[in-house]
Amino acid sequence: MEENPTEALAQDLEQWIWSLPATKLLEREADLLARARSAEVEVAAVLAELADETLALAFQKGLLRRLVFQEWLVQRYERDLTRWFWEWTGDRELARDLTQEIYLKLLGPRAVWTYNPERLFLPWLRAVARNLLMEHFRRDRPVGALPAEGLLSRAPGPLEQAAARECEQRFDAELNRLPAEQARVLRLAVCGATANELAAALGVPKPRVYQLLFKARRAVETAFHQKPPPPLSPGSPTLQHSSPAKRWPLP
């Protein structure tokens, strides 16, 4: 079977990002662009094949920063960040503003460099989002109006509980359709395993863990989007928040 040129270039780029120092990586940028033109593939499509952690390291090393940032955070997480802020604030415009504030915060002089790409990216992004929301509450509300027990204290209602059960069943079904290695890494990650633990369990380098996890998540997300959940009962509303994105982009 002929190798997909986008995937082949992505594999080479991933190896460069993890193995080369920043100066050497930047020297490969012209080669990357030339190979993409020769293969008639978009550089953005190549970046879309890379895991979050790989893109974070590429950004830190200065490789194609604008395109990398667009794929790493805007394409992948803008919708979920905005939705999460909206759920907590009840204000669509404010949710968009907070999402943009996250981007500005991450592009500040230190923020992105406090993230260690040797660790899983999503827990770090969750913490940044929670901290920003708490800053908003402290800045714009009286102290007594803050959530009493933090951002994770809300109890789900009956509809949310039903949606969660439906999501669990569909998630398990889709997991069973994945290649064995992808299914294992995603199952362990959902259970809270760290990148080091995943690498040890699978006997592979961490960049390989990140790529397996990225491909598994994308496959499950695609399956969920293609097959919307059924209504709870005739005449009842369709289950909400049943996308697997509810599991990992944000709490």
Image (spheres, rainbow, N blue to C red):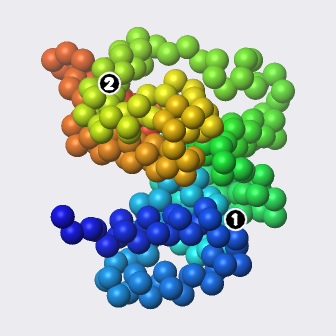
- x, y percentage for residue 234? 15, 17
**Which element carries disc 1, helix, strand or loop?**
helix
**Residue at left offset 47%, top offset 59%:** 50
Q: Quarter-wise, where is residue 65 in the image?
A: bottom right
**Residue 244 as seen in the image, left or right of residue 156:** left
Residue 32 in the image: above or below residue 230: below
Residue 251 appears in the picture as rendered: no
Q: Which residue is labeled 1 in the image?
A: 60
Q: Total number of numbered labels? A: 2
Q: Is residue 201 left or right of residue 113?
A: left
Q: Nearer the viewer, residue 165 or 59?
A: 59
Position of residue 249 measured from the top left corner of the image (x, y, whole percent): 52, 40
Residue type for callout 2: Asp
- The residue identified by callout 2 is 172
Q: Is residue 26 above or below residue 178?
A: below
Task: Determine whether 192 is above or below 25 in the image.
Answer: above
Above or below for 15 versus 177: below
